[in-house]
């Protein structure tokens, strides 16, 4: 943590001088695996870009649904077949060795899934992460946007986020939502705009400085 002025005051003024803490271990929770090797996917490359931005020490990917599919039709066939308690136990295990969790299972329930069934899966995931002593999650924009969509969402043609590179825009797009508020919402699939906060809170979650456009956002609490 930073010395000198109070952390809150330093965060509000964007003052520099914070010494980074130990690099965090990052867990990304997505929808379900691809049939392609993980490291050959766009999602993996974009998660690795986020890991670089946060100076993560390691990266792991977990999924709400463990079964790989080749199409939305195959994914629809799994509706109602995923047991919530299995999801909770699996994410409890996966998140137990992570310092930071980013969710990216999609901004709406998969085609063929009812809102109720998907809500139960999201709730089970939240319980598993809570069991692993996490109190919140990161996400890109106002929703659990899938990593395969991060570059399009942050593209400069939309003028949504500052930054000359994808990495800087990605950091600008990051938000944090407490797990207690991770309830399904029709337009955000588990993330509500009123419950999310931006970079000062994220700096606290990763317990290190983050920087966008020359402004540093500093940790304001210890995990």
Image (cartoon, rainbow, N blue to C red):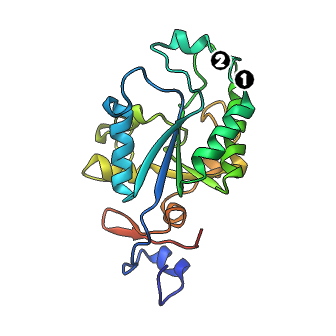
Instruction: Report the residue at 62% width, 33% height from top.
Output: 189
Q: Residue 54, relative to residue 21: is it above or below?
A: above
* Quadrant location of the C terminus in the rendered image: bottom right
Residue 69 shows up from this direction: yes
Instruction: Report the residue at 47% width, 79% height from top.
Output: 10
Pointer 2: residues within 10 angstroms few (<14), some, or many (20+)? Answer: some
Residue 191 shows up from this direction: no
Rendered image: mark on residue 117? 1
| Along the line of sight, the residue nearer the viewer: 73 or 129 | 129
Q: Secondary structure at mark 1?
A: helix
Rendered image: mark on residue 214? none
Q: Residue furthest left?
A: 164
**Mark 1 and mark 2: Cα distance apart in space:** 7 Å
In this rendering, position of residue 43 left or right of residue 205: left
Q: Secondary structure at mark 2?
A: loop
Query: What residue sits right under mark 2 in the picture?
Result: 113
| Along the line of sight, the residue nearer the viewer: 62 or 3 | 62
Instruction: Report the residue at 37% width, 37% height from top.
Output: 44
Q: Are marks 1 and 2 in contact (CB under 8 Å)?
A: yes
Q: Residue 149, relative to residue 164: is it above or below?
A: above
- Quarter of the image for residue 192 reads top right
The spot of residue 208 in percent (x, y) is 45, 69
The spot of residue 191 in percent (x, y) is 62, 42
The spot of residue 123 in percent (x, y) is 72, 37
In this rendering, position of residue 181 left or right of residue 109: right
Instruction: Report the residue at 60% width, 52% height from top.
Output: 96
| Along the line of sight, the residue nearer the viewer: 3 or 95 | 95
In this rendering, position of residue 154 left or right of residue 63: left
Q: Residue furthest bottom?
A: 4
The spot of residue 73 in percent (x, y) is 53, 9
């Amino acid at each position: 943590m930073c010395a000198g002025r109070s952390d809150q005051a330093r965060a509000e003024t964007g003052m520099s001088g914070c010494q980074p803490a130990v690099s965090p271990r990052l867990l990304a929770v997505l929808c379900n695996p691809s049939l392609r090797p993980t490291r050959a996917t766009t999602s993996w490359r974009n998660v690795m870009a986020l890991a670089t931005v946060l100076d993560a020490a390691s990266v792991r990917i977990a999924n709400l649904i463990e079964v790989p599919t080749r199409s939305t039709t195959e994914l629809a066939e799994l509706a109602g077949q995923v047991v919530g308690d299995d999801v909770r136990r699996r994410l409890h295990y996966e998140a137990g060795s992570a310092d930071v969790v980013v969710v990216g299972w999609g901004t709406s329930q998969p085609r063929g899934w009812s809102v109720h069934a998907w809500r139960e899966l999201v709730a089970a995931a939240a319980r598993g992460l809570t069991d692993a002593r996490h109190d919140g999650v990161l996400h890109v924009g106002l929703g659990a946007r899938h990593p395969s969509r991060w570059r399009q969402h942050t593209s400069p043609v939309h003028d949504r986020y500052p930054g000359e590179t994808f990495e800087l825009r990605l950091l600008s797009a990051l938000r944090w939502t407490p797990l207690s508020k991770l309830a399904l919402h029709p337009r955000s699939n588990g993330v509500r705009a009123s419950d999310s906060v931006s970079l000062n809170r994220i700096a606290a979650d990763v317990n290190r400085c983050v920087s966008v456009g020359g402004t540093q956002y500093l940790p304001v609490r210890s995990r």
